[in-house]
Image (cartoon, rainbow, N blue to C red):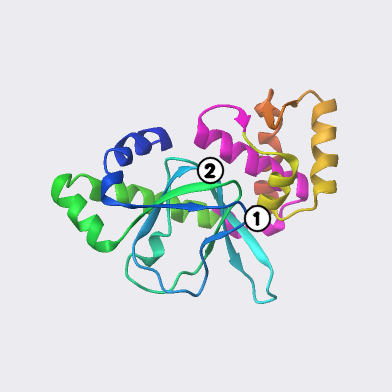
Amino acid sequence: MVSPFETDMKWETFLEFGTRQFFKAKSAIYRQGTMGEGFYYLHKGLVKIVTSTVKGNDRLLNIVVPGQIMGLQSMDQQLHFTTAIAVKHAVVYHFSCAQFLDMLKVRPELLSLLTQTVNQKMRILLNAINLKALTSEEQIARLLLNICEDFKNHEVPLTQQELADCAGLTRITVYKILKKWKEDDIIELRNRTFVIKRPERLKPLLVESQAIQTV
């Protein structure tokens, strides 16, 4: 699997093909139900991908970190079935289908990279299907571990409010969970970031929940 940093290195050399755009925190980069054409590359910031349920509530599907792409479902110029919201101020590059074809002429191997990314997105969606069955603590654990895996370190660049926004939980709920984890020496709070000191203490939460779901 191509890591986000390897993806970042490859995409950085092709940013000239894309259109640079800036989005303020809490603003939508694209919305579910709108027509799309192409995809986006996240250069700076943090973005959450959500989908609206039949009850009108947003359900978290994924967190996009710098070096990753999003909005691939509109490569066939159809409607977006998810919404991308900037958690932090974000700098993105939009690549239209025509621009991507121009890139392929220069670097044909990008087709393989795109295929790998699509496969990764499918796994993320499959994992998100069971997210609603998780407890609040399990949801936060999965979110933090996924972000750490993408960043390849255990420092999470999110405030408590941003973490609550990503998970769709209240700030009080997140505060209580983090307070408990801090007392258990699982995490450490440094300025506006979280440092996961003992990630092995969080992984059993997800293992247990997965075992329950397969019974």
Q: Is residue 130 magenta?
A: yes
**Looking at this view, is 60 or 210 the one in front?**
60
Q: Position of residue 129 (x, y in %)?
A: 59, 60
Q: Which residue is drawn at the image coordinates 23% and 62% (left, top)?
A: 98
User: Which residue type carries mark 1?
Assistant: Leu
Q: Left or right of 46: which side holds 114?
A: left
Q: Is residue 22 above or below residue 82?
A: above
Label 1 sits on a secondary structure element that is: helix
Q: Give the residue pinned by disc 1.
A: 131
Q: Which mark is residue 45?
A: 2
**Looking at this view, is 188 or 37 the one in front?**
37
Q: Which residue is drawn at the image coordinates 24% and 46% (left, top)?
A: 110
User: Which residue type carries mark 2?
Assistant: Gly
Q: Is residue 108 above or below residue 6?
A: below
Q: Position of residue 69 (x, y in %)?
A: 41, 50
Q: Left or right of 76: which side holds 122?
A: right
Residues rendered magenta in the picture: 127-156
